[in-house]
Image: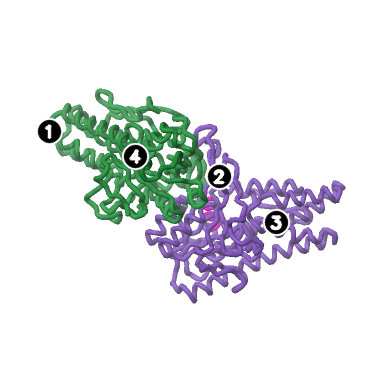
Chain colours: A green, B purple
C-alpha cells in the first residue's frame, strides 16, 4: 500500500484513485475543474475525512487556476469555492481545509499551493503520530501481547494521505507483531470495509475476516474482540462522534460488553465550535445506494429508503481518542 | 399477499415459492425427494422458523413416499429423516416438526400427512392468535394511536404458513389503522428485509422505508421508532432469543434508548430443553454470501469471512414475548 497514492497533486491538476471501482479495478482520474472535484467527492471516488481535507485544499488551487483560465469574476470564484466547501456536509475536514487555503487567494498560486501541500504534509505526519500515540497508550493501559481488533468503514491510506487513522494504528500494531486478526465490517451500503479496508489489509499482509455489519454485536458480546477502533468525520466538544453509519452499533455493543472502543482522528476532525452531536448535520444519500447492487434490484421498485451516511456515537462511549497531540483532545469518561 | 401460498402440499409433493429469486422473479418449485427438501432449506429457497416447521413436517411425508417408491430399507429412511432434521441447526421448529411427524411413520401415509397438515394448521391459527394477543397487549400497555415500527429480517407470510409472526402483528395493526411507518432493516447478507419484507409490505399497502441494518441504531436513538418487533428461531428457557444476525444490535439500541423490543413467535419456537442461549448452536454459512453479489466480487478474491446466520439476544432485553398462548411463555424482566 505504501506506493499507492490515492491523492496526488501534479503541476496543475489533482490525480485520484477512483475508489468506487475498487477492489476489481485500479483506475486513476484527473481532476481539472471545481466541478470535477465536487463530483469526485459526491460520488465517493474520494472519501474519508482526512482525505477530503486534502482534496478540498487542492480543490481551492484548482479553482484558482480555473478562474484564471476561464477569466472568472471574483463572485464566480467565490461561488465555486462555496460549492466545493459544501460538497458533503458531515466531515468537518473539507470545510476546514477549504477555509484555510482560501485565506490566501489574494497571495497568488504559489502561496495557495504551499498551503494545500502543508495540509497534506500535516496529515501525513498526523497519521504517524496518531499511530505512535495509540501504541504507547495501549502499551501503558492495555498491555496485551496481541490484539483481535474490530473496525468499521475504511480509515486507511485510501481515507487519508498516508497510513490512515484507525487503520494506521492497526498497521503500526501489525509491524510490532501485535495483530492477531482484524474483523472488518463490510460497511453497507457502499462496502468501504469489504471493498477498501480488506484490499488494504490484503496488501499489507494483515490477517482479517470480513463480516456483515450486523455480525459485529454478536462478535463483540461473544468475546471475539479485544477492542474496536474507528475513525471520525466530526467530533463535537463533548466527544460526540459522527462517523460512518453503523459506528454507533459497534459502540453500543462495546459499551455493553465492556470492550474498549477507540476513535482515531487528527485534530482537524475535532470541531470545537459545536457543543454536542446534536449540532452535526447528517448527510442523507441517494436511495439507489441501498436498493441496487450493480444492475440488480434488491427491493421492490420504488421502495422508499432511509439512507443516512453517518450516525453519532455519544462521547461517553469512547474509551479514548487517539490524535496526533496527546493531551489537547477530549478523553472520554 | 393473502393469495400467496409460499408452501403448499399437492397430492404427493410440496410446492414452494423460491424465495431466493424474489422480488424480481416469482417462481415455484416442486419438491419430490428428501434431497429436494434439504436443498431448498439450505439454499434458503424456503426459510423462516415456522415455515421450516411445516416444510420439515411435509418433508417426512415426502421421505415416506420416496421410501416406498425406491424401496428403501428402514435404515435408509431413518438416515434421510435425520439428514432432513439436521438441514439447518438453529431454528428449533425444523427438528421439532420432523420429530413430531416421524412418530407416526408406522401408521401409514394418511396418518403422517394428517400430522403434517395439523402442524401447518396450528401455525396458521398461531399466526392470528399472536397478532391478536399483541394488539391487546399494546392496547393495554402502550396505547399509542399509531406506531412507527422497526423490524428485522422477514417474519411474514413467506416465513410462516399464513400472516406471519412479527409481520403478522404489523399486518393486524395496519388493519386497525395503527401503523405510521415500518422501518425495514435490509438484513444482510441475504437481504430478507429488502427483498422479502418490503415485497410483502408493498403488496399489503403498508408504508415502509428500507434501511441498511447499521442505520437501525441511529434511527432508534434518534427517536424515529416507537417499538421494534422481530421473530425468533429458538428461545431458551431464560428468554435468550436466537434470531437472524443483527437482531442483537437492534435490541441493544432499544435497551439503551428505552424503546420497547418485542419478540413474536409460536410456542413451537420456545425450547424448554435449554436453559440459556449459550446452548444454542449458531449456524455459520458460506462466505460467498458476503463476498459476492450476483456476479460482482465486493471484496478481494480469497478473503476470509465470519458469517454467522444468527445471534443471541439476552432475554432481559425483550420487553415482551407475543405468542399464541398468553401466559405460557417467558415475559422478560
Instruction: State the image quarter where residue B145 is shown.
Output: bottom left
Helix, strand or loop at disc 3?
Answer: helix
View extreme (top): residue: A11
Q: Which residues are magenta?
A: B193-200
Q: Is residue B194 magenta?
A: yes
* Label 4 – label 1 distance at C-alpha: 43 Å
Instruction: Please state the horizontal and vertical placement of residue A86, each as a whole percent of the image.
Output: 26, 43
Q: Is residue B50 left or right of residue B116?
A: left
| Circle on res. B199 | none
How far apart marks 2 and 3 lie (CA) works out to 23 Å
Label 2 to label 4: alpha-carbon separation: 33 Å
Which residue is under mark 2?
Answer: B307
Q: Is residue B331 one of those drawn in magenta?
A: no
Q: CA distance from mark 1 to mark 3?
A: 77 Å
Residue B212 placement (x, y as % from top left):
46, 50
On screen, residue A206 versus residue A273, left or right, reads right
Can residue A35 be seen by looking at this rendering? no
Q: Position of residue B149 (x, y in %)?
A: 47, 62
Residue A264 falls in which quadrant of the image? top left
Circle nearer the viewer, 1 or 3: 3
- Describe the element under mark 4 as helix, strand or loop: helix
Residue at image mark 1: A106
Identify the residue under disc 3: B95
Q: Which residue is mark 4?
A: A136
Return the x and y of residue A256 as percentages of the image width and height: 44, 56
Task: Calculate the distance from the C-alpha at mark 1 to the C-alpha at mark 2.
Answer: 56 Å
Q: Chain of mark 4?
A: A
Foreground tag (3 vs 4): 4
Q: Chain of mark 1?
A: A
Q: Are marks 4 and 1 on the same chain?
A: yes
Residue nearest the viewer, comparing B152 with B182: B152
Q: Do the residues indicated by labels 2 and 3 lie within the same chain of the protein?
A: yes
Amino acid at each position: 500500500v505504501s506506493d499507492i497514492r490515492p491523492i496526488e497533486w501534479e503541476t496543475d491538476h489533482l490525480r485520484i484513485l477512483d475508489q468506487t471501482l475498487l477492489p476489481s479495478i485500479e483506475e486513476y482520474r484527473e481532476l481539472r475543474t471545481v466541478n470535477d472535484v465536487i463530483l469526485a467527492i459526491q460520488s465517493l471516488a474520494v472519501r474519508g475525512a482526512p482525505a477530503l481535507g486534502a482534496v478540498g485544499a487542492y480543490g481551492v488551487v484548482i479553482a484558482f487556476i480555473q478562474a484564471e483560465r476561464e477569466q472568472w469574476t471574483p463572485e464566480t470564484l467565490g461561488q465555486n469555492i462555496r460549492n466545493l466547501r459544501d460538497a458533503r456536509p458531515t466531515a468537518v475536514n473539507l470545510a476546514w481545509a477549504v477555509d484555510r487555503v482560501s485565506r490566501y487567494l489574494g497571495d497568488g498560486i504559489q502561496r495557495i499551493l504551499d498551503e494545500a501541500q502543508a495540509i497534506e504534509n500535516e496529515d501525513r505526519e498526523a497519521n504517524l503520530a496518531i499511530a505512535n500515540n495509540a501504541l504507547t497508550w495501549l502499551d501503558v493501559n492495555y498491555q496485551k501481547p496481541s490484539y483481535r481488533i474490530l473496525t468499521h468503514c475504511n480509515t486507511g491510506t485510501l481515507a487519508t494521505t498516508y497510513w490512515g487513522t484507525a487503520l494506521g494504528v492497526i498497521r503500526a500494531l501489525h509491524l510490532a507483531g501485535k495483530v492477531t486478526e482484524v474483523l472488518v465490517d463490510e460497511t453497507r451500503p457502499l462496502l468501504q470495509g469489504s471493498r477498501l479496508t480488506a484490499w488494504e489489509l490484503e496488501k499489507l499482509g494483515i490477517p482479517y475476516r470480513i463480516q456483515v455489519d450486523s455480525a459485529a454485536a454478536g462478535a463483540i458480546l461473544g468475546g471475539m474482540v479485544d477492542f474496536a477502533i474507528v475513525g471520525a468525520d466530526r467530533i463535537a466538544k463533548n466527544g460526540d462522534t459522527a462517523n460512518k453509519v453503523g459506528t454507533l452499533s459497534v459502540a453500543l455493543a462495546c459499551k455493553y460488553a465492556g470492550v474498549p472502543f477507540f476513535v482515531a482522528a487528527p485534530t482537524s476532525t475535532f470541531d470545537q465550535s459545536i457543543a454536542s452531536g446534536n449540532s452535526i448535520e447528517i448527510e442523507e444519500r441517494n436511495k439507489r445506494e441501498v436498493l441496487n447492487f450493480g444492475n440488480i434490484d434488491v427491493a421492490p421498485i420504488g421502495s422508499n429508503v432511509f439512507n443516512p451516511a453517518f450516525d453519532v456515537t455519544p462521547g461517553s462511549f469512547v474509551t479514548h481518542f487517539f490524535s496526533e497531540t496527546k493531551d489537547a483532545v477530549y478523553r472520554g469518561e
